[in-house]
Amino acid sequence: MDSHAAGNPLSNDPSERPEWSPLSWQKYPIKQQPEYDDQASVERALNKVRALPPIVHQHEVDLLKQNLARACEGKAFLLQVRSELQRYKHSNLIHSEKGGDCAERFEDCTQETIEKKFKIMLQMSLIIIHGARVPVIRLARMAGQFAKPRSAPLETVDGVQYHSYKGDMINGFALSERKPDPQRCVADKLFLF
């Protein structure tokens, strides 16, 4: 890696930042990657995921870029909502609802919960439209945030070490399901269709 590529990506000085390209992220170490026991199973799962259609159509991405540009120009207001994971313990999760979860579980992603979050987001946007008199771009991270990095790969519960829960896309919430399973990546993508 050259010295420019090893620069500080967060620096305000452009001469200190690494040169960016679509593949430049590959120059950095992967620190939150799940550790799978069977690499052949990982490849099978990835091949299944690669064969599925995209979750978001390119037209939607282009439209979002246009709308974000309008917000940057002051011609619209960006309302971005999500929930933060307030506390994590092996026996419970506590959320503060703000529109979308930090890490979701398959079992919690129901029509009713999504509709409630949309309702909150619509109510917030109506208040902003009324007060600011500009269009609101609603952006929510929900129904698909099934993986979450953790500060440590393992956690200790009652003196026993387990893999940290990294989201339903990686492993199960129950202590007995904590071994990372690459087939969950396939289930994650299929769940969204």
Image: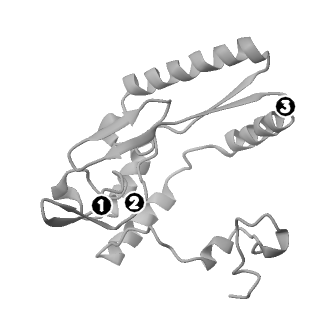
- Crowd around label 3: few <14 · some 14–19 · many ≥20 (10 Å): few
Residue 29: percent from the left, percent from the top? 54, 77
- Residues at discs 1 and 2 in contact (Cβ within 8 Å): yes
- Residues at discs 3 and 2 in contact (Cβ within 8 Å): no
Residue ID for mark 3: 74
Using the rendered image of the protein, determine whether residue 193 is visible from the camera's viewpoint. no
Picture quadrant where residue 103 is located = top left
Q: How far apart are marks 3 and 2 (CA)?
A: 36 Å
Using the rendered image of the protein, determine whether residue 157 is visible from the camera's viewpoint. yes
List the single residue furthest toward the bottom. Answer: 2
Q: Which residue type does callout 2 highlight?
A: Arg
- Position of 103 relative to 83 (above/below): below
Element carrying mark 1: loop
Residue 112: percent from the left, percent from the top? 38, 22
- Crowd around label 2: few <14 · some 14–19 · many ≥20 (10 Å): some
Q: Residue 150 carries which label?
A: 2
- Position of 13 relative to 59 (above/below): below
Residue ID for mark 1: 164
Screen quadrant of the C terminus: top left
Residue 43: percent from the left, percent from the top? 41, 72
Q: Which of marks 1 and 2 is nearer the N terminus?
A: 2
Q: How far apart are marks 1 and 3 (CA)?
A: 42 Å
Element carrying mark 3: loop
List the single residue furthest toward the top. Answer: 130
Tell whether 4 sits left or right of 38: right
Q: Which residue is drawn at 75% across and 75% down?
A: 18
Q: Which residue type does callout 3 highlight?
A: Gly
Picture quadrant where residue 165 is located = bottom left
Q: Which of marks 1 and 3 is nearer the N terminus?
A: 3
Q: Which of 41 and 19 is in front in this view?
A: 19
